[in-house]
Amino acid sequence: MYHALSFLTGVVIAVMVFINGGLSEYYGIFVAAVIIHIVGVVFAFVLCAAQGKRIPPRQHQPLWIYLGGAIGVLTTVFNNFAFGKISMTSIVALGLLGQTAASLATDCLGLFGMEQHPFKRESFIGLGFSLFGIFIMMDRTVGSAACAALFSLAAGVSVVLSRTVNACLARHTGDLQGSLVNHLVGLPITIVVAALVIMRDPAAFADLSCPSVFSTQAWIYCGGILSVSTVLLCNITVPRVSAFRLTLLTFVGQLFTGILLDLCSKNTYPGTSFVGGIVVAAGMVFNLVYEHVSAVRKPNGKSY
């Protein structure tokens, strides 16, 4: 079940990115991020109130478990620095590489109190497929913009850090309350970042034509609802699925949902992303099948 939820997380992320992209066209990336956090805070608060759930007071928990929302803002900042300097395909590929590296470190070392998942020999095949798929997705722009490539890698690492820290918080607060705290922490930071961007270039925001929430474009304001759902799903799956497997399942769900959305909206989608995604998915399927067969044969005294 948790593998299916991991895949569903990727589907929700893809839809969220699509919706948030529409919002960013009107407001810009950072102002849109503020709106997304406001909607997320309101939505999560209403859900918590409706279910009678409260955020328990901090007792002996370290402060860092409350920083998942702040780390999530860094993901947006890092990707924004890379955008336009390297191709979108390379941003996705390098982000996945950063997530893969951070996930393996989390699994092998048991970082942030997560359960250790030692790297098995058979997992090298899945890892090999993943790295090859990432290599397929990257293009020449990476070599000509090393700084942007590093920002994309950092964005991938921050994704894993954010969801892991949020999961640590959810152990104390509850899954839904953890999602609320994530957005409460991220909101003031996004406001500060957006204010700095506007002060730096006020002319860019002078002629914005923003749709009303009652217009036919009202759906672009729903990204915050999906953001809460994404954090909630991660809070459920992170403690129960290895970080490496969660990364790959989420990526596969996100990639192919993104392709479908692009086809439906008549946007083009790079063929290299599709091929790379197929390779990553093939490695994921191989590992799942191999482990299932191993689990079935072990009771009979046969093991790999």
Image (cartoon, rainbow, N blue to C red):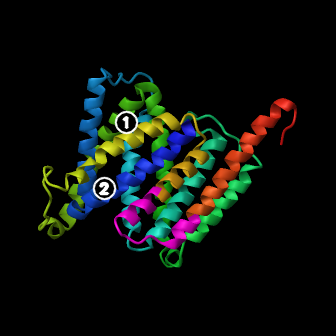
Q: Viewer-proximal residue, 267 or 35? A: 267
Residue 191 in view = no
Q: Image point 27% across, 24% down: which residue?
A: 50
Position of the C terminus, as image quadrant, is top right
Q: Main secondary structure of the magenta part?
A: helix
Q: Residue furthest right?
A: 301
Relative placement, left or right, of 301 versus 264 is right
As drawn, the label of residue 26 is none
- The stretch of residues the image draws in magenta is 257-276
In the image, residue 138 lies at what x, y percent? 54, 71
Q: For the residues labelled 2 and 1, say whether their Cβ atoms are less than 8 Å apart.
A: no
Q: Is residue 77 above or below residue 40?
A: below
Q: Which element carries disc 2, helix, strand or loop?
A: helix
The residue that appears at 31% across and 55% down in the rendered structure is: 19
Q: Total of numbered circles in the picture?
A: 2
Q: Residue at x 19, y 52 (%)?
A: 218
SS of the residue under disc 1: helix
Identify the amino acid type marked 1.
Ser
**To which residue does mark 1 refer?**
179
In which quadrant of the rendered view does residue 1 lie?
Answer: top right
The three-letter amino acid code for the residue at tag 2 is Asn
Which residue: 76% across, 49% down?
Answer: 122
Disc 2 target residue:
20
From the top left corner, tell me how far across and down residue 4 is, in percent. 54, 41
Q: Is residue 206 left or right of residue 99?
A: left
Q: How many other residues sit within 10 Å of disc 1, few (<14), some (14-19) or many (≥20)? A: many
Q: Is residue 267 magenta?
A: yes
For marks 2 and 1, the one nearer the N-term is 2
Q: Indicate yes or no whether the magenta region holds residue 225.
A: no
